Image: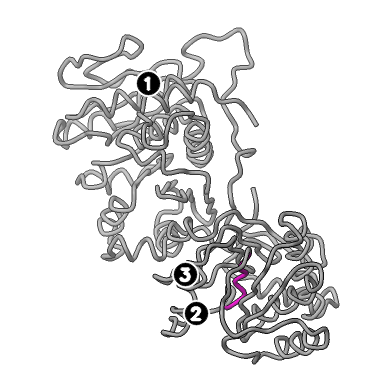
Amino acid sequence: MQNLYKEVGSLDRRCYEQFELSEDILMEHAADGMADFIRANYDSESKIIIICGSGNNGADGIALARLLHVDFNVEMILPFGAKSKMAQLQLKRAKALHVNIIDFLEPCDIVVDALFGSGFSRSFDNKTEALLQEMNMIDAEKIACDIPSGIHLDGTVEKLSFVADVTLSMGALKLSMFLDKAKDIIGRYYVLDLGISKHVYEVESNYKLLEMDDLNLPYRNIENSHKGSYGHLSVICGEKEGASIIAGLSALCCGAGLVTLISNENVNIPYELMQSHLIPPNTTAISLGMGLGQEFSEDELDKFLDNDVPLVIDADMFLHPILLKLLARERVVLTPHPKEFVALYKACGLGEITVDELQNRRFKYVEIFCKKYPYITLLLKGANVIVCENDKFFVNPHGSNILAKGGSGDVLSGIIAAFLAQGYTPLDAAINGTLAHSKAAKELTCNTYAMTPNDLIQSLKRLKQS
């Protein structure tokens, strides 16, 4: 996993103060990294136009133009002039080499956005919006210098932002790059070093970006074992029993030795699953909420949950009056989608927010929740899943639109519950659950619109350790 940062200015200052690296040196390395990337990935006959802002992000772009000058057909646009000291210095250097400066965007092969960078926080004026619209509409490969213009440091995203094919992040990855609204903006992302090893430039961060190599599957390494050795999951089966069946089958495919659906009435279920009206005494995890509806009274749920068994709570449970009682337990994983999280947030007395407010500042609101409930594991669904517990936050960027289908969340609940049943900690169950879910989706060969929960379950069976 990689570190994520709310801001990197403090990391740059550390380079100045502790390692005697000047702002100029860091900028030259940033520009050199971008130049190396372009040389390695694009034809030398490509025409490149670099749109440079008036600050230090623009200075990075001007330095890039100087480095690519002669090797490529390079032109710069400076719509706001050069105002920062570094921008003025870099412009003086570029002019000495006669780098061409133009006034308007022309047909080209590559457009580089070096307008604002991660420190910009103001709304765009009409001139900027018109320029960004023009940059987005041109038929060219689009590269963002550090971060696409329009993604702000606080995580908010402008309605009109530069839509990059590639983002070249300077020094380290920024947390704001991994909001849901940024997913269709940043494109492929790479980190460029600034003249110092990444391991020295970075400091420990409470935010981590999950990688597929972090997936830890529950392989069976002991031959002398039986079904009870691998946990017994009880799934509370509500009005829409299909959701519970999906979760139960997913759990079986992720290693749970036994899965029982708990229902008031006999339900027509696959033969692999068991059924009961009571929680089996050897249950090692319970999952509830998927398709629950009004099937059980509060008293019935109280009886089912009169234990200290680990829980996965999903879907309808976020509107249930018993929710706050369950939040007093330990070893609990919550798996809300944004609308459900808004209901959870209100129920916990944390305030009323809209789904749009949540999506604009997802990290802010999960931090607030975790501060109040540090012993609860929260998995906030979305284009980029956030898993958090206490002061530890993990982002899974590997989800895809193939998962935008009814039943996908039930599969995820089943995976997490299976890992819990087998002895994973709640945090590890949630992290590995979301990674397994994403990897199973990525390895499907059907069209993106065609996936069914059963396809996803079958893919889970074929997962291998990276």
User: Residue 327 location, x and y as percent?
Assistant: 34, 47
Residue visible at 49% across and 67% down in the picture:
136
Residue 12 horizontal side relative to residue 439, left or right: right
User: Residue 448 location, x and y as percent?
Assistant: 41, 37
User: Residue 142 location, x and y as percent?
Assistant: 58, 63
Quadrant for residue 207, please give it. Answer: bottom right
Residue 258 horizontal side relative to residue 185, left or right: left
Q: Secondary structure at mark 2?
A: loop
**Type of the residue with mark 2:** Ser
Decide which of tag 2 and tag 1 comes sooner along the chain. Answer: 2
Was residue 114 drawn as part of the magenta stretch in this picture? yes
What residue did someone put label 2 on? 121
Closer to the eye: label 2 or 3? 3
Of all residues, the one furthest to the right in this rendering is: 20
Q: Secondary structure at mark 3?
A: loop
Q: Secondary structure at mark 1?
A: helix
Query: Which stretch appears magenta?
Result: 110-115
Q: What's the mark number on residue 161?
A: 3
Residue visible at 60% across and 58% down in the picture:
166
